[in-house]
Amino acid sequence: MRVTHINLDAFMLKVARTREVEASCDDCAKHSARLIEALMQGNVQDQELLDILHHVLMCLPCSQEFQVLHDCARMDAEDSWPSMDEMWNQIDQAQ
């Protein structure tokens, strides 16, 4: 892979945002549901959950998985799940 100025800047920004002690992907998977509940209630004050949120913001795979879980929780809370036809249409459009 060719290193570009943009790639290097993005890498340096991520390094600058690291912390001495960080949550891992395993921690994120274990505590995502609790974090989603806290976010939906507008009450994220627990340091452990703040560490998980920081990890979600820094880690692309965890961020993507977290977004899906958050969307599911939101649709569940709003009782706004799409129909099967709507889901299949969205899948077809994504391909």
Image (spheres, rainbow, N blue to C red):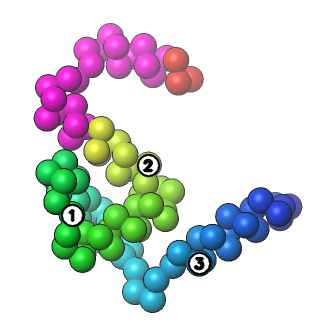
Task: Determine whether, in the image, residue 2 is placed left or right of residue 29.
Answer: right
Q: Nearer the viewer, mark 3 or mark 2?
A: 3
Where disc 3 sits, the SS reads helix
Q: Residue at point 45% right, 89% down?
A: 20
In the rendered image, the vertical position of residue 25 relative to residue 32, given as above or below: below
User: What mark, if any, has residue 64 been given in the picture?
Assistant: 2
In the rendered image, the vertical position of residue 26 relative to residue 68, given as above or below: below
The answer to which of marks 3 and 2 sits earlier in the sequence is 3
Q: Quadrant of the C terminus?
A: top right
Q: Amino acid at mark 2?
A: Gln
Residue 72 drawn at (x, y percent): 25, 37
Magenta-tinted stretch: 72-92
Residue 41 drawn at (x, y percent): 14, 51
Residue 33 drawn at (x, y percent): 20, 55
Q: Residue at point 37% right, 46% down?
A: 67
Local crowd size for mark 2, using a 10 Å CA cut-off: few (<14), some (14–19), many (≥20): few
* Of residues 78 and 65, the one drawn nearer to the viewer in this rendering: 78
**Badges 3 and 1: C-beta atoms under 8 Å apart?**
no
Q: Which residue is mark 1?
A: 44
Q: Residue at point 77% right, 59% down?
A: 6
Local crowd size for mark 1, using a 10 Å CA cut-off: few (<14), some (14–19), many (≥20): some
